[in-house]
Image (cartoon, helix red, strand yellow):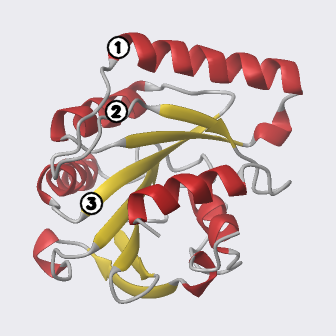
């Protein structure tokens, strides 16, 4: 297991793109609906229980929260989408922030989209996938809460998502160059610590560690 990730430290909360740090180095973003366990997954992947705040009220992440791994590498926790009880004007602002970030952030090497295993590929999940492919951002899907289903139905859900993305999206050629990447899918459980090694392997690749 790569020990880089448990060195993650909170850097800043970003409400506007002009607040982002210099666009250099390597950055990987985490995105997902507000109730899929994204913050819990980030804490599990970094072995830091309180790195990302978790809440029983979905939608608590209302800005881009940046975490440093070292001088050149960062993780970006993007605003949760699709569920938060906030005014439509605020949601529109979040979505504009997300889309512009994906389109313009040069240091962004890839994005992990978290989906609830029991309810994958909801409307805004698909919109996120569309944005990422259009922007040339390599994408990886993590299906959370795998402990909620037995192995057979869980693997069936993985196959369904793999079939969908395989038919709809061509391999993504990173905008900064490199080999085109198909969208991969994995199971994950924060409760059971399942899927951490696979997530680390993908992060290692994108962060070149």
Q: Quadrant of residue 116?
A: top right
Label 1 crowd bin: few (<14), some (14–19), many (20+), radius 10 Å: few
Q: Do residues under tags 1 and 3 come within 8 Å of each other at their CB atoms?
A: no
Query: Can you tell which quarter of the image residue 157 is in?
Result: top right
* Depth check, front residue: 137 or 76: 137
* Above or below, 7 relative to 87: below
In what element is the residue under mark 1?
helix
Q: CA distance from mark 1 to mark 3?
A: 23 Å
Q: Nearer the viewer, residue 164 or 128?
A: 164
Q: CA distance from mark 3 to mark 2?
A: 15 Å
Q: Earlier in the sequence, mark 1 or mark 3?
A: 3
**Of circles 3 and 2, which is in front?**
3
Disc 3 marks which residue? 108
Q: Which residue is mark 1?
A: 168
Q: Secondary structure at mark 2?
A: helix
Please tell me how many numbered marks the rendered image carries.
3
Q: Are marks 3 and 2 in contact (CB under 8 Å)?
A: no
Left or right: residue 98 versus residue 48 is: left
Q: Position of residue 147 (x, y in %)?
A: 84, 41
Residue that numbered label 2 is attached to: 129
* Residue 200 on image: x %, y %: 60, 60
Q: Which of disc 2 and disc 3 is earlier in sequence?
A: 3
Residue drawn at (16%, 74%), measured in percent from left and top? 23
Please tell me which residue is depicted at 85% across the width and 19% down the height of the picture. 152
Around disc 3, counting alpha carbons within 10 Å, would you say few (fewer than 14), some (14 to 19), or many (20 or more)?
A: many
Q: Residue at x 40, y 47 (%)?
A: 81
CA separation, marks 2 and 1?
10 Å
Is residue 152 visible in this depiction of the protein? yes
Q: Going 37% across and 33% down the picture, which residue do you hit?
A: 124
């Amino acid at each position: 297991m790569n020990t880089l990730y448990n060195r993650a430290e909170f850097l800043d909360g970003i409400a506007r793109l002009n607040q982002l740090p210099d666009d250099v180095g390597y950055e990987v973003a985490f995105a997902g609906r507000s109730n899929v366990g994204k913050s819990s997954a980030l804490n599990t992947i970094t072995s830091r229980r309180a790195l990302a705040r978790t809440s029983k009220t979905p939608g608590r992440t209302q800005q881009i929260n940046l975490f440093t791994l070292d001088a050149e590498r960062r993780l970006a926790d993007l605003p949760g989408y699709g569920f938060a009880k906030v005014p439509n004007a605020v949601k529109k602002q979040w979505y504009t922030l997300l889309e512009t970030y994906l389109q313009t952030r040069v240091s962004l090497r890839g994005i992990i989209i978290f989906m609830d295993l029991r309810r994958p590929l909801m409307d805004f999940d698909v919109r996120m996938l569309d944005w990422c492919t259009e922007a040339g951002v390599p994408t990886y899907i993590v299906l959370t809460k795998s402990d909620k289903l037995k192995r057979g139905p869980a693997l069936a859900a993985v196959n369904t998502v793999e079939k969908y993305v395989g038919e709809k999206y061509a391999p993504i050629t990173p905008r900064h160059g490199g080999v085109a990447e198909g969208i991969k899918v994995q199971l994950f459980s924060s409760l059971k610590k399942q899927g951490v090694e696979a997530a680390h392997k993908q992060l290692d690749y994108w962060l070149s560690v």
